[in-house]
């Protein structure tokens, strides 16, 4: 499987990686509904067996539970995959989530993640959100200290604007950026991706299938039956009038995929990988079967004509 260097690091990562958000399970603010840990572990094992060499998680996913699942999944593997996680999203005893970029908070979170992941060092440690904005400099300074001390190998950011990355860069180099990017979420194309490309910042995009919406498996009936704690219930892209537009785009993805023997989801992921500034994509999976339905995206190359078709459809649907 093709690998690319992630920014200024020494890590060469596969073009897709395992996203462990849903593996946090249900019962917290941004849950995807219930999730069986055995299915999560099977999904990770299938991905690693297929050649994927990195996993992306975060402390807040399941309020620590996703990291614990990842630890179980990688334990005993002959070759350990790269493990990426995040800080800044903190929670209280009632499960209420907030943001902190205070140095002491980031250090405490790092130690907690190392314990849950059962690792001596985190391969890539990322600031999850630039919140609060006024503390970015304090938070990034502490991230650089953690790297100097060897607790983390590389440091990155997630959901930062170009201006916020520029502020962090004055303190220490950024290895990677993790932004949301898909056919129906393209805001970063104007300023963020060009900044990353100019500054040798690797880009690992999340939600390339827009949380399953572009996977080809999403239907109105399935959306109607989302679990009560599934955050997607409240997302406008899963509601009318945008839902009809998005399902129409999925039909074009399906048609293009049929020409390659691939799923619509694989086409959606490959579309993000076609951008020259994008290093790799995080793909959320909840079962081994889902892994088998997306793994082909890593090798799929869309033609100029296919990319133009999708571009035209997006403009037509937006009109």
Image (tube, rainbow, N blue to C red):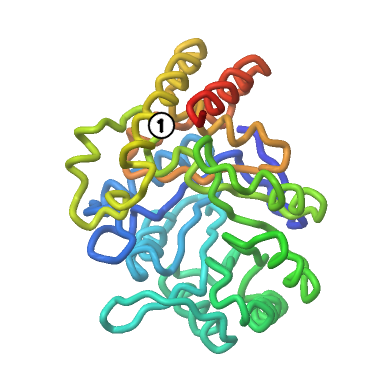
Residue 296 visible: no
Query: 48 or 233, which is in the foreground?
Result: 233
From the viewer's perspective, tell me whether residue 309 is left or right of residue 247. Answer: right
From the viewer's perspective, tell me whether residue 81 is left or right of residue 236. Answer: right
Query: In which quarter of the view is residue 213 placed?
Result: top left
User: What residue does disc 1 label?
Assistant: 246
From the viewer's perspective, tell me whether residue 211 is left or right of residue 93. Answer: right
Query: 80 or 213, which is in the foreground?
Result: 213
SS label for mark 1: helix
Query: 71 or 28, which is in the foreground?
Result: 28
Residue 301 visible: yes
Q: Which residue is outermost to the bottom?
A: 104
Q: Residue at x 30, y 58 (%)?
A: 31
Q: Residue at x 37, y 74 (%)?
A: 97
Q: Which residue is outermost to the front?
A: 319
Query: 299 or 315, which is in the foreground?
Result: 315
Q: In the rendering, at what x and y percent does residue 17 appear?
A: 52, 45
Q: Residue at x 71, y 59 (%)?
A: 162
Q: In the rendering, at what x and y percent does residue 51 appear?
A: 53, 37
Query: In which quarter of the view is residue 211 placed?
Result: top left
113 over 235 or under it: above or below: below
Q: In the rendering, at what x and y percent does residue 48 appear?
A: 47, 42
Q: Which residue is outermost to the top?
A: 259
Q: Residue at x 33, y 44 (%)?
A: 286
Query: In which quarter of the view is residue 312 placed?
Result: top right
From the viewer's perspective, tell me whether residue 315 is left or right of residue 61. Answer: right
């Amino acid at each position: 499987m093709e690998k690319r260097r992630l920014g200024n690091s020494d890590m060469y990562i596969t073009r897709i990686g395992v996203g462990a958000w849903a593996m946090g399970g249900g019962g917290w603010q941004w849950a995807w509904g219930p999730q069986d840990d055995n299915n999560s572990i099977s999904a990770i094992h299938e991905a690693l067996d297929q050649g994927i060499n990195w996993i992306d998680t975060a402390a807040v996913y399941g309020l620590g539970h996703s990291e614990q699942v990842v630890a179980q999944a990688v334990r005993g593997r002959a070759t350990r995959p790269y493990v990426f996680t995040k800080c800044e999203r903190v929670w209280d005893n009632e499960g209420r989530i907030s943001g902190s970029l205070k140095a002491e908070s980031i250090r405490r979170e790092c130690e907690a993640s190392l314990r849950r992941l059962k690792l001596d060092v985190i391969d890539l440690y990322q600031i999850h959100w630039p919140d609060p904005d006024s503390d970015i400099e304090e938070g990034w300074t502490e991230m650089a200290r953690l790297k100097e001390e060897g607790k983390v190998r590389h440091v990155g950011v997630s959901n930062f604007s170009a201006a916020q990355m520029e502020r962090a860069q004055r303190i220490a180099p950024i290895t990677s950026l993790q932004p949301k990017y898909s056919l129906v979420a393209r805001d970063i194309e104007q300023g963020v991706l060009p900044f990353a490309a100019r500054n040798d910042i690797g880009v690992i995009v999340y939600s390339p299938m827009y949380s399953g919406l572009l996977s080809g498996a999403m239907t109105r009936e399935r959306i109607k039956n989302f679990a009560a704690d599934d955050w997607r219930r409240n997302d406008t892209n899963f509601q009318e009038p945008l839902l009809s537009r998005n399902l129409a785009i999925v039909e074009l993805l399906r048609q293009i995929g049929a020409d390659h023997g691939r799923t619509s989801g694989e086409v959606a992921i490959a579309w993000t990988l076609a951008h020259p500034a994008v290093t790799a994509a995080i793909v959320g999976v909840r079962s081994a079967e889902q892994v088998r339905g997306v793994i082909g995206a890593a090798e799929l190359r869309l033609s100029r004509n296919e990319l133009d078709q999708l571009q035209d459809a997006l403009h037509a649907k937006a009109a």
